[in-house]
Image: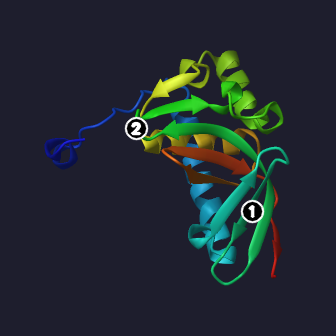
Amino acid sequence: MGMFDRMFGGGKKKIAYPPALQPQIEKAVHALQALTTAHDNTWHLGEADWSADLDEGTIEFTAPNGMHATARCQVIGTYDTKQESWLWGWDHPSVPPPVAEHAKKVQAYGQKNGFDVLTTRKLDCPEDQCWELTALACMLNNAQGAYRGPAGTALVFFTFGKVTLSKP
């Protein structure tokens, strides 16, 4: 991205959501913001280191105060920061099928309602739109939160379930 793009808002444009999907996206984003605030206030999600074991389907966070948070996780998708593209977890070569169930539920919702943005395997979009799609997955699956973790030049977007907290 060049200097003028940074100054004048260049880069990838958001994919327009169908009118019937837009309110669901907005509702999901607000719900995820509330969940994230609660986790951050309780165990410092925003400051925690993370690791995930996709074979086990778990994600673990370690906060600076030593608090450990562990939960079941699902991969919703990945964002390639170089290509600025999203790849859904439901058809991702690196995502084991058991941890793609939440993404598959979003795909099924998209198929049922004719929302191509939820059924197209790869999307060219900005990173903030990946958060919106992950928020929708969180809402549709009644997850307890979502997280985005770096993995090389990719960002992995997760949903997670009930959190178990412990001190070392």
Would residue 17 be seen by someone viewing this image from the given angle? no
Q: Foreground residue, 25 or 89? A: 89
Which residue appears at 40% of the width and 38% of the height?
Answer: 82
Q: Residue 29: percent from the left, percent from the top? A: 55, 48
Q: Are marks 2 and 1 in contact (CB under 8 Å)?
A: no
Q: Residues within 10 Å of mark 2 (few under 14, many from 20)?
A: few
Q: Name the residue tied to disc 2.
A: 82
Q: Is residue 144 rendered to the left or right of residue 131? A: right
Q: Looking at the figure, which quarter contains the C terminus?
A: bottom right
Give residue 147's position: percent from left, percent from top: 62, 54
**At x 57% / y 72%, what residue is drawn?**
47
Q: Which quarter of the rendering shows the N terminus?
A: top left
Front one among 86 and 55: 55
Work out whether residue 115 or residue 40 is closer to the camera in this orientation and state it: 40
Question: 158 or 131: nearer the eye?
Answer: 158
- Left or right, 87 with reference to 96: left
159 w.r.t. 98: above or below: below
| Residue 93 on image: x %, y % | 68, 27
As drawn, is 30 to the left or to the right of 76? left
Q: Residue at x 70, y 33 (%)?
A: 103
Location of residue 2 in the rendering, given as x and y in whole percent from the top left corner: 19, 42
Residue in the picture at 65% in, 22% down:
110
Relative to 30, residue 41 above or below: below
The image quarter containing residue 126 is: top left
> Earlier along the polypeptide chain: callout 2 or callout 1?
1
According to the image, label 1 marks what residue? 60
Other-residue count near label 1 (Cα within 10 Å), few / some / many at <14 / 14–19 / ≥20: many
Quarter of image, res 64: bottom right
Q: Nearer the viewer, mark 2 or mark 1?
A: 2
Name the amino acid type tagged 1.
Answer: Glu
Question: Which colour assignment does the render follow?
Answer: rainbow
Looking at the rendered structure, the secondary structure element under dot 2 is: loop
